[in-house]
Amino acid sequence: MKRSCEHHQDCMQLIQKILDGEASVAEKEEFFANKDLCMPCQKGYELESSLKENLKSKCQLSCPEQIISKIRTKLFLLLILISILIPLFC
Amino acid sequence: MLMEVEVKDKIYSLGNARGVFEKEFMPHMDAMYNFALKLTADEDDAQDLVQDTCLKAYRFINSFEPGTYAKAWLFRILKNNFINDYRKKSRGPSKVEFEWVEQSISGEDEAAEPAYYADLQAETVNDMLGDEITAALQSLPVDFRMIIILCDLEEFSYEEMAKILDIPIGTVRSRLHRARALLKTKLVNYAKTKGYN
């Protein structure tokens, strides 16, 4: 297995493209055919995928129920206001 | 008389407009709040930003095409709202922010990208707590933070991100690459101070 990669920058960009679902079938095939032969690419792939997974799973929050209620109330008031105002101008 | 919301491309009755809002927009409240909180880094500002975005979306509901991607439409409104109102209120971008973003936009300096994160391991990231990763994300310049949230948390495509951010796809790619490089640098520094292996 190779311990250094002469195309590491390009490989890292390709890894991100693959994980983002933006790579073509040919690009994916080429990468996965070589991944296990190159340690930096293998490590890079593991790091990028764990970073993406951890961001997705550990950095999400739910919207507090009070905000949703506030927005619904404001919309309701807006609807009432429009209902009152429109007949005055029609 | 049928009362209508102001029209641009099509007309919704008030009831229909509210129905579209509930069906198409409300399912994205968590994602919008999450995005707003990470942009403003303040709970009250995030609440206001989400509310303003919803009211603006409602106001311009006639320019929304049902069946199209409501989430991307809402995120674009939220991002514009943030840039036009909240970002101005807080502060302009720092010099560092400009430099990073300018480099990413021009696509220059790709070869000179710092590789301080070379010793960051997947296991280290797996061991980190959500608060620690969030803190590293929050410490990024806002344009970098924004693109990572859109891509990694919300899973927008490059094309959708280009539309939301009003930038070319090439800039999406390069900005994302640089944002991730900086995030890894922050994480490796953080891991060292906290004694992660």
Image: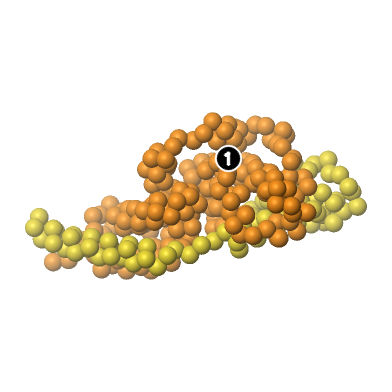
> Label 1 neighbourhood size at 10 Å, few (<14), some (14-19), many (20+)?
some
Q: Which chain is drawn using orange? A: B
Q: Is residue A8 visible?
A: yes
Secondary element under disc 1, as helix, strand or loop, is helix
Q: Give the image's coloring scheme.
A: by chain
Name which quarter of the figure residue B10 lies in.
bottom left
Q: Total marks drawn?
A: 1
At a point 44% along the width and 63% down the height, the residue shown is A63
Q: How far across and how far down the image is residue A21, in percent?
A: 64, 56
Name which quarter of the figure residue B84 lies in.
top left
Location of the C terminus of chain A by quadrant is bottom left
At a point 48% along the width and 60% down the height, the residue shown is B31
Q: Residue furthest front?
A: B194
At a point 27% along the width and 61% down the height, the residue shown is A74
**In this rendering, is residue B188 above or below B122?**
above
Question: What is the chain identity of the residue bearing mark 1?
Answer: B
Q: Is residue B48 left or right of residue A51?
A: left
Chain A pictured colour = yellow
Disc 1 target residue: B171
Q: Is residue A15 visible?
A: no
| Identity, as a three-letter code, of the amino acid under mark 1 | Thr
Q: Is residue B166 left or right of residue B191?
A: left
**In this rendering, is residue B121 above or below B144?**
below
Q: How far across and how far down the image is residue B100, in percent?
A: 59, 35
Q: How far across and how far down the image is residue B117, in percent?
A: 73, 45
**In this rendering, is residue B79 above or below B34?**
above
At a point 72% along the width and 33% down the height, the residue shown is B112
Q: How far across and how far down the image is residue B189, in percent?
A: 70, 45
Q: Nearer the viewer, residue B79 or B169?
A: B79
Q: Nearer the viewer, residue B180 or B14?
A: B180
